[in-house]
Structures are given as C-alpha cells and as structure tokens.
Image: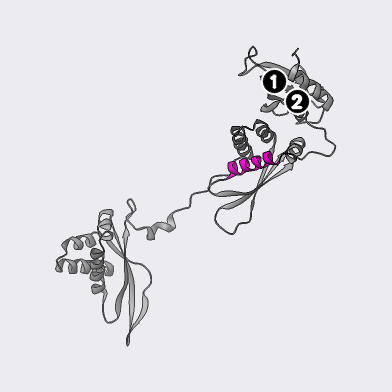
C-alpha cells in the first residue's frame, strides 16, 4: 500500500501534468511532502473541516524555480489544494522548503539536532590588560600603558535581561599610579576606554571599568619595582616592565630568599636603559635579546631599593649619572 503522503504528492503531480504543466509536475515529483503540524479545525458555513498544513521539500534548482515565480508557486499550491479538498478536509497552507545537502531533509526537521556553538572562553585578564596597554601606547601615552602593565584585572559577569552578557571590570593599580590618575582625569578615562575595548567580545560587553587600588597585606612595604618606578617617573622617565620571573622581588616577604627578578625598560634623557631588579646581588642572568654595547644595563639588588630615598638615589643615577 502506498503511504498516504506519497499518494498525495503523486496525485498533485499528476494533476499538474494533466493541466499541461509538465515542468512543475516534475519538480513536485522530485520533492518530499510532509505534514507541517497538526491539522486545524475550520468551520466553513455549516460544515467543519480538518485543514492540513503541508511542507514540500525540494532540491535547490526546484526551490529556486518555485520561489522565483509567484505564478508557479500558486499553481503548485492549487494542485495540492485540489488533491486535499474533500467534504471533510482542506489545505491550510503549503510551504516550499529547501532540502539540505547531505541530510536530505529540510531545516524544519533537523534544526533541533544542531548543537549551539560553545562560546569561546573569556580571555585571560593579563591578555585583556596587554591589549589595553598596547592600545594606550599606540595613542602616544607610554606612561599610561606602563600603568596598565603594572596593574591586575578582575572581571565578573553581572545580571543581564538578555542579549550579550555584561561584564564588570576592576583594574587594580599600584596605589601611586591610582593617585596620579586621580589628578589626571583625561588619562584615567583613556585607560578605562582601552580596557573596555580590549575586553569586549561578540558574546560579552564590558558594561563598566573601575579603577581601584591593588590589594596587599596591612603594613606590607611597597615592592622594590614600584618604589623604583615611582622615583624614575618623578624624574620624567618612562618605565615599562619587560619580564617578571616567579619568586621575584615583591613576590615574597621583604628580605626573603626570592629567586627571580624583574626587568624594566627605562627611557630617560632620550636614552634606553635596561634595569634588572634581582632578589639578591650577583644573580643577573644572561643578556638574552639585549646587546650590552648598545643598551646600557644595570642590576640592582632588591635590598638597595628598601626605602623611597634609596630608590630616588638609584633613579637619579639612571636618569643622569654614570653607571658603574
């Protein structure tokens, strides 16, 4: 026995051919007919009928031919309406659907199988700060970029009514940097805009960027890097962190046996200097990508930066004095 829907399609195709529309008959014959939902109950005058919604799924050439010509589409619908019409039944609608290559069905039958693409993970906070710092530096503000490179970023999602997720960012700055930004509103806003730009993604929007002080234990001393950086910037130098090693100065308690170091690039008086802050004297590492004969270098023990006064002396030496 021929399935009911197959017989219905064959009847519509035969009717089109009988009406002299052999091309349309072939298009219908090459498609598949399905119910597009449960039947509807209609009242036509004194009688009640069951109205069916049908979906004709065809390949791309047939789909293009039918949807490009309203007269052709109307003729196909009329053929199916004639095949469906009885005292108890009517055609509610006929939708023409595109058959998807590879699956042989229309999207209406497979869309539930399509798994949504997983949203990419939120970038690491250091990557966001790095992008923001590069943007600030590209705008000509090297000091603002250095502030961001010394900072740490916190990000948290906030409730949203829909659409893109909303993220709130807090940039924790060195206290001296935050105090300086309090006196320079233009630079502070530039840093906020840069963090907002670097942190925005297709699936997330940065709703706010707040500048806050870096956290540290009560009574803890400034890290040697921060003391030297402030002293250098007070003399007009531009300081950019180049690298930090685990266990470097400031990573452990003052006077502890830290095993790493911090490298800074310092531009002072039109000259590029390289400064390495070592946890203990005599721990300078290899020259890496720097050439000593072209870039002056200095290694400073963390204990030599124990006070702002000592940091100021080192800064004065770097900005104007001769290196030993």
Counting from the top left corner in percent of width and height, residue 288 is at 62, 18
Q: Give the residue at mark 1.
A: 269
Q: Is residue 179 above or below residue 235?
A: below
Per the image, label 2 sits on a secondary structure element best described as loop
Counting from the top left corner in percent of width and height, residue 210 is at 69, 46
- Quadrant containing the C terminus in the rendered view: top right
In three-dimensional space, the C-alpha distance between marks 1 and 2, rounded to whole angstroms, equals: 10 Å
Q: Give the residue at mark 2.
A: 235
Q: Quadrant location of residue 297?
A: top right
Position of residue 14 in the picture relative to residue 100 (left or right): left
Query: Does the magenta stretch mainly form a helix, a strand or a loop?
Result: helix
Q: Foreground: 24 or 135?
A: 135
The magenta stretch spans residue 259:
no
Count of marks placed on residues: 2
Q: Foreground: 272 or 262?
A: 272
Residue 211: give its label: none
* N-term mark: 1 or 2: 2
Counting from the top left corner in percent of width and height, residue 77 is at 26, 68
Residue 102 in view here? yes
Please report the residue visible at 18 percent of the width from the left and 69 percent of the height from the top: 15
Please report the residue visible at 82 percent of the width from the left and 27 percent of the height from the top: 308
Magenta stretch in the rendered image: 185-200
Q: Residues within 10 Å of mark 1 (few under 14, many from 20)?
A: few
Residue 280 in view here? no
């Amino acid at each position: 026995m021929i399935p009911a829907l197959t017989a219905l399609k064959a009847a519509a195709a035969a009717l089109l051919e009988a009406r002299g529309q052999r091309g349309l008959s072939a298009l219908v014959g090459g498609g598949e007919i399905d119910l597009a939902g449960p039947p509807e109950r209609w009242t036509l005058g004194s009688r009640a009928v069951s109205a069916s919604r049908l979906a004709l799924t065809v390949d791309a050439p047939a789909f293009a031919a039918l949807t490009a010509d309203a007269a052709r589409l109307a003729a196909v619908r009329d053929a199916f309406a004639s095949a469906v019409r009885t005292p108890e039944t009517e055609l509610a609608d006929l939708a023409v659907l595109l058959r998807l290559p590879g699956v042989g069905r229309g999207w209406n039958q497979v869309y539930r199988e399509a798994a949504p693409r997983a949203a990419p993970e939120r970038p690491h906070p250091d990557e966001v700060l790095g992008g923001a710092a590069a943007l600030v530096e590209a705008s000509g503000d090297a000091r603002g970029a250095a502030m961001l490179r010394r900072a740490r970023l916190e990000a948290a999602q906030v409730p949203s009514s829909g659409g893109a997720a909303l993220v709130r960012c807090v940039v924790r700055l060195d206290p001296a940097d935050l105090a300086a930004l309090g006196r320079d509103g233009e630079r502070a806003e530039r840093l906020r805009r840069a963090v907002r730009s670097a942190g925005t993604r297709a699936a997330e929007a940065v709703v706010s960027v707040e500048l806050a002080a870096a956290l540290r234990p009560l009574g803890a001393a400034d890290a040697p890097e921060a003391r030297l950086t402030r002293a250098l910037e007070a003399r007009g130098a531009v300081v950019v962190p180049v690298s930090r090693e685990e266990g470097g100065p400031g990573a452990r308690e003052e006077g502890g046996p830290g095993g790493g170091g911090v490298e800074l690039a310092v531009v002072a008086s039109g000259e590029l200097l390289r400064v390495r802050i070592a946890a203990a004297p005599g721990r300078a590492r290899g020259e890496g990508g720097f050439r000593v004969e072209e870039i002056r270098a200095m290694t400073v023990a963390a204990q030599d930066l124990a006070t702002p006064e000592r940091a100021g002396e080192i800064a004065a030496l770097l900005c104007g004095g001769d290196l030993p």
